[in-house]
Image: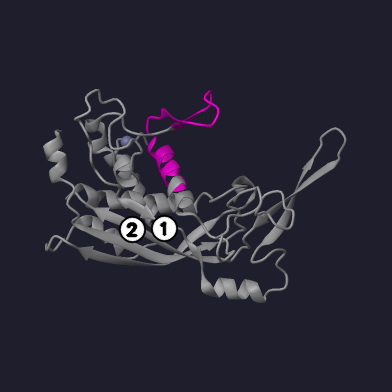
């Protein structure tokens, strides 16, 4: 794969935009800054828009969790990556380390690769892999009706949220050590938007199913913190896909079947056997 080839492959052919509702089926805690803005003295506050004070779901939280779940499900090789503040700490994530592998990798192609456009293990600077990110997940704003209902509700502990007390019991003294966690109550709805850009025909069209699978995996898992304690179960609802074409062609590709009716958990059941076969996963 050479630079010239790559430059020829970045024409934006079209895009699929998914819009709908992301509903919190259980209380949702996506942590915000614990300094300054935390009002009401809770131990763990949720992230809020600084202008409106509304809790929102960062696109990075949705995208990051979907990627992590898909990485695990696909059993992708992990590399030691981002260094944290203290230099001794490292994080293991998957990213492709050579252009050839990247070309075949639905994960890196769909979710992107944070290497500044250069393959980490590529010795020569001119081997630039210039595939732009396909997936854009926007911050999900609280739905206007949810906001209105929560504003009218006198049972909220803090503006638009509830505070739940979690208790750790000391096993020797039986003493309860409570801490207060702010969360968006179950039933709250957020307006989400996911954009899937199409650059390569047919790969990108076929890889769209990995996005639906990742959405399905997220529904079966959780978003935000305290997930093993019941928080963060979410569901994508009323998903409306919009297809736009920029290359003047009529694309009638198989992958677009997946946009007909988007119900990620349901689709995952039929998509996963296909994906497992495609990726050579052991049954
Ligand atoms: Zn990869």
Residue, disc 2: 195
Return the x and y of residue 86 as percentages of the image width and height: 55, 27
First-in-chain label (1 vs 2): 1
The image shows residue 69 at horizontal and vertical percentages of 45, 43
Q: Is mark 2 within 8 Å of ligand 1?
A: no
Q: Residue at x 41, y 44 (%)?
A: 67
Q: Nearer the viewer, residue 238 or 91?
A: 91
Relative to 28, 251 lies left or right: left
Residue 214 location (% of width, % of height): 40, 49
Q: Is residue 224 left or right of residue 126?
A: right
Dot 1: few (<14), some (14–19), or many (≥20) neighbours within 10 Å?
A: some
Residue 55 at x, y percent in the picture: 57, 61
- Say which residue appears at 41% left-offset and 40% top-offset: 73
Question: Is 256 situated above or below 84?
Answer: below
Q: Is residue 203 left or right of residue 71?
A: left
State which region is magenta: 65-92
SS at badge 1:
loop
The question of residue 81 being in magenta is answered with yes
Quarter of the C terminus within the rendering: top left
Q: Residues within 10 Å of mark 2 (few under 14, many from 20)?
A: some
Instruction: Verify CB contact (< 8 Å) between mark 1 and mark 2.
Output: yes
Under circle 2, the secondary element is: strand
Whether residue 223 appears in magenta in the rendering, the answer is no
Which quarter shows the N terminus?
Answer: top left
| Above or below 203: residue 249 | below
Q: Nearer the viewer, residue 103 or 4?
A: 4
**Quarter residue 111 falls in:** top left
Point out which mark residue 138 bears. 1
């Amino acid at each position: 794969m050479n630079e010239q080839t790559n430059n020829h492959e970045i024409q934006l052919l079209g895009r699929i935009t998914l819009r709908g509702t992301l509903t919190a089926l259980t209380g949702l805690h996506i942590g915000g800054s614990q300094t300054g803005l935390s009002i009401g003295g809770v131990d763990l506050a949720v992230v809020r828009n600084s202008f409106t004070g509304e809790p929102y779901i960062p696109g990075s939280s949705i995208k990051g969790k979907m990627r992590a779940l898909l990485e695990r499900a696909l059993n992708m090789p992990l590399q030691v990556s981002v260094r944290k503040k203290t230099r001794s700490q490292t994080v293991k994530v998957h990213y492709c380390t050579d252009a050839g592998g990247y070309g075949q990798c639905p994960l890196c192609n769909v979710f992107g690769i944070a290497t500044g456009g250069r393959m980490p293990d590529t010795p020569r600077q001119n081997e630039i892999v210039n595939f732009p990110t396909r997936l854009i997940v926007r911050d999900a704003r609280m739905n206007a009706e949810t906001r209105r209902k929560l504003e009218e509700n006198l049972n909220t502990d803090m503006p638009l949220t509830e505070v739940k007390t979690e208790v750790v019991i000391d096993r020797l003294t039986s003493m309860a050590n409570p801490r207060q966690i702010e969360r968006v109550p179950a039933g709250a709805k957020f307006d989400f938007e996911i954009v899937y850009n199409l650059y390569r025909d047919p790969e990108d069209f076929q890889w769209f199913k990995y996005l639906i699978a990742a959405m399905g995996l997220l529904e079966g898992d959780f978003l935000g913190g305290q997930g093993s304690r019941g928080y963060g179960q979410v569901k994508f609802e009323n998903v409306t896909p919009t297809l736009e074409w920029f290359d003047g062609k009529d694309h009638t590709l198989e992958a677009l079947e997946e946009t007909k009716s988007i119900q990620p958990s349901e689709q995952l059941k039929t998509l996963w056997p296909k994906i497992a076969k495609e990726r050579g996963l052991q049954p």
